[in-house]
Image (spheres, rainbow, N blue to C red):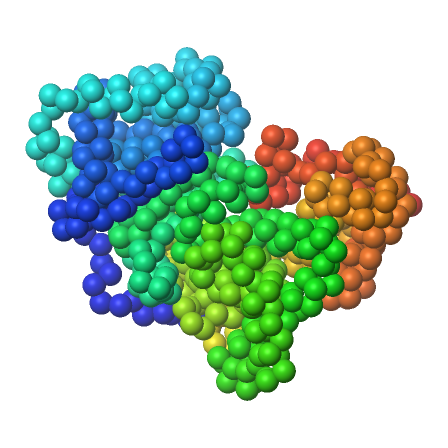
Amino acid sequence: MREFTTPAPAGLEATGGLADSLYDTADRTPDLVQLSRRTGDGGWQDVTAREFRDEVLALAKGLLTRGVRYGDRVALMSRTRYEWTLFDYALWSIGAITVPVYPTAATEQVRWILAETQAVACLVEDEDAAMTVGAVCDALPDLTGIWQLDRDCVAAITEDGLDVPDALVHRQRLGVTAANIATVVYTSGTTGRPKGCLITHANLAAEADSLLAGWGEVLRDTGGGQPATLLFLPLAHVYGRAVQIAAIRGGFRIGHIPEVSADALLPALESFRPSFLHAVPYVFEKIFQRARRTAEAAGRSELFEQARQVAVDWATAREQKAFGRGPGPGAALRLRHLAYERTVYPKLRAALGGRVRTVMCGGSALRRELGLFFTGAGLQLYEGYGLTETTAAITANPAGRPKLGTVGQPVPGASVAIADDGEVWVRGGSVFGGYLNHPRCTAESLVDGWFGTGDLGRLDEDGYLTITGRKKDLIVTSSGKNLAPAALEERVEAHPLVSQCLVVGDDRPYVAALITLDPDALAHWLKTRGREQLDAWAVLADEQLHDEVQRAVAAANTAVSRAESIRAFRLLPREFSLEQGLLTPSLKLRRTAIAEFYSTDIEELYLS
């Protein structure tokens, strides 16, 4: 077993609960702006550390009057918004445990999570969500309250606690230790029913403090202004949660936006003007494709392509120099890069608010070329890797020394090892303590402090990890050929028209694929060819479109052997979606569900 460890800086050991840092900051720097709330006109209202502390304390007193007690579990079923953070810290202030639930969760998923956690209350956004929870109340004897944000439950609960002394909350808070469970976060459920991960205050503090220790300086490099980030990651996902906590502990400013569509996100970025961002690859893919389509519509597609290639070449040369494998960008490349730095790259950065210089990416694999492009365009990208069980990132590209295409080295205080079968094992302060009500799964996954991730990977000579696939996703053809599909799918998805690709072939004579198209990219592709928009079913029979996707498949196949190459594919009439149950909330493919849903299409791929 090959192992690599990043030492932890002194003083990273957590004590007390997560809420303590909020109260400490308010005492030390009461006028520090900690959050900004979205106003009705699209602007932002600053909230100081003192103001946020007072709101949290007042809500915590109200929660006590509503019957929430130390150790109780309360579900938060909401999109990313200010009130999410407010409830998180109020519940932690009285020693309660939060249970995130995706607002898109199906009724059966909601029933399962609330029943297994024995939640005593559930926060929801609107009437539809309240009805979803209400529909399963009969099966939830522990549930005593449903609180609705659009009915101003915050004000109502706060008012209930007006007569409760502050000391009662502080007594509860000071009883919370780092070893206490802070939250029960459910896995994405790509291979079965989600399991609840028991994550402690120490786990979340270790994750946040590792982020600040390893990357705090590059996040603070904002020309003297306060670092700020716009949080649009779902707070029901552990990645968004870790970013929230790191920002609170680090004295950064946070804004919230509940939607990740370009129409909602881009105006928010422009008005909030963050200095750094955390996002999943999907967001960067969409930003890149939008920029390319804008250039094409303006008749500047050739200029954009040249600028893209120069950014990739410049970032590649800089990376090679950082590792002693090249001299860095030559004079000609530096001049071309400078020219585009004056004309093209600032427009891309302006779309993100103009202040962003550092972006961190996780959740799934990011194409190396895409990372190089953003880095070369002045947005230094750091890719990381983690799971719910590791409380978000357990590895990340180190500050000042990223190697794009990898997920970096272990974060400070963590270790990574590769088992004989290629499985990635990890350990560190952010690794969870086990699964709720699943002792057998816990015992199988946690061995002497090491957690078996189920992912396959390799460590290079510099200790950088590359994820190559997932053990359970391995495809074994009828001829006995093993294939990890992720890399092949990623290459197909690099084509601008392709949205998603699922490679199939288990116990089949050859490898095939199901492919969906990006609706915006398809509309643009048709328009540039003077063609009418196609309906969803006409797409499947369009020969020109099929030939275009065939070129994407052929390009992807050049990177693998013939036995591993895609021999047939089927275009589908619409993208895999959350609503169909074909994606996890973090937008990963539910492979088994997709194979079942499109079983007829898969069978037809093997009839000829």
Image: 503 above or below 46:
below
Q: Is residue 45 left or right of residue 106?
A: left
Quadrant (top left, top right, bottom left, bottom right) of the C terminus: top right
Q: Residue at x 64, y 71 (%)?
A: 310
Residue 37 visible in the current orientation: yes
Quarter of the image for residue 225 reads bottom left
Which is more toward the observer, 132 or 120?
132
Where's residue 98, x and y in %? 32, 34
Which is more toward the observer, 548 or 262?
262
Where's residue 405, x and y in %? 57, 65
Q: Is residue 236 left or right of residue 158?
A: right
Q: Is residue 85 left or right of residue 480?
A: left
In the orientation shown, which residue stands out farthest toward the top? 138
Q: Residue at x 70, y 42 (%)?
A: 520
Quarter of the image for residue 60 reads top left
Where's residue 71, x and y in %? 23, 32
Where's residue 507, x and y in %? 75, 49
Q: Is residue 491 left or right of residue 405?
A: right
Q: Residue at x 31, y 52 (%)?
A: 252
Quarter of the image for residue 295 reads bottom right
Q: Residue at x 23, y 43 (%)?
A: 48
Residue 412 visible in the current orientation: no
Q: How many marks?
A: 0
Image: 469 above or below 437:
below
Which is more toward the observer, 76 or 468?
76
Image: 133 above or below 383:
above
